[in-house]
Image (tube, rainbow, N blue to C red):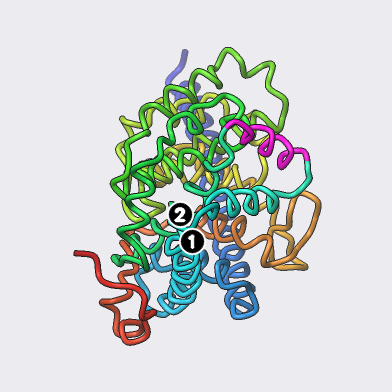
Amino acid sequence: MSLSRLSYKLAVSFTFSLLLFTQACSAKTVQDNDAVKVRQAIQANLETQLYQLPPRVQGHYGIRLYRMTGDDKYANAALVDLYAVTESQAFYACQLDKPGFVEQEAKAAISLLGNGPRAKARKKALQPFPEFIFYTDVLLRFSSRIDEFGLEGPCHDKLIKALKATDLQHGLTDKAMIESWAAQLINYAYWAKQMGVGDYINDYKQAFNQVYPASRDKSLKKSQYRNKIYGMTHFIFAASEYYQHQVDPKEFAWILDYFEANIDRILKDATDDIIAEVGISFHLAGLSDNPVVKKTQAHIINAFDKRENIIPSPKGNPDLALGEHRNVLAMMLLNWPDKLYQGPYLHRLKATKEYLPKQVTQKP
């Protein structure tokens, strides 16, 4: 081959490679710009109307934005949540020794689950141990949130004593329970360890993997597949204490590797909430450059409704109170920070320390 012909081929090859590289960079720039626009639009929409949302929803948003930014301006939204959970813990924990109280409140909690297919499955799963929901979704939920703020709530000792006396293992490892609310159960397992009332994490992990082995994937209906993926993301979320610090990617390689290998099905069958959580799982593991993150970001950007400035529900509902969870996850996925912040420790912050509920005390 003549030198001139070889030079021509090399020039053509170089030009083609440069074109592909330029196109890839251009596509990345477009997606990055879209990510900024979508995140900013959602944030402006939520924060303009934040005071209109229920207290726990305001708190959910403020806590996450504080952990993403460390900005004290979100502390008062967390304080609103603290008032709500403190009042609830006072009601439930301080009446634990009242005859019939736990049974009565467990029935009340079950009745609030609703009447849809998922609610019916959960009610059926709870039949062998109906009080499980009281100890986990009530006592552990409220006390763990107060604990995250560096505080103890009312009747704390009574609450801890009751939780230590309750064996949660059967409810946490039951097949029907796992198939009904996998993500919630891993939350409960981590909250129990956080509060020092029992370590059920490994038992739950073993039970979860027995219920959802990879070999079962092909036979899983969409709802069960979503439950599996949702549960897997919450192993990582709970281990991070809900976005307060990164997790060890080696410890959760069994989850991250699965997500990477099955991302196509996840994008096809999961909801926007779950898809955002899959991407955030890689952020939390320090793997923000993994291709799964870009794929989930692209999906979330595409799900954004420009007219409503929100990512609506699967049925198209743009309601902010119902959609805050989905949309704050989208914000986090699209704009992950270099540093995460613990707390907020409301008793230390100038904006909140003088306004704490009288029923809380600083943790020893």
Up/down of 58 relative to 205, above or below: below
Q: Quadrant of residue 124?
A: top right
Q: Give the main secondary structure, helix, strand or loop, of the magenta stretch.
A: helix
Q: Secondary structure at mark 1?
A: helix
The residue positioned 43% from the left and 38% from the top of the image is 235
For marks 1 and 2, give the one nearer the viewer: 1
Up/down of 307 relative to 233, above or below: below
Q: Residues within 10 Å of mark 1 (few under 14, many from 20)?
A: many
Circle 2: residue type: Leu
Up/down of 350 relative to 102, above or below: below
Residue 3: x, y in percent? 42, 21
Residue 192 magenta-highlighted: no
The residue positioned 55% from the left and 34% from the top of the image is 16
Marks 1 and 2, how far apart at CA: 7 Å
Task: Examine the rendering and report whether any part of residue 321 can be seen.
Answer: yes
Please provide the residue range marked out in magenta. Answer: 117-128
Q: Secondary structure at mark 2?
A: helix
Query: Which mark, by number, is residue 139?
Result: 2
The answer to whether the residues at label 1 and label 2 have Cβ atoms under 8 Å apart is yes
Q: Which residue is mark 1?
A: 92
Q: How many marks?
A: 2
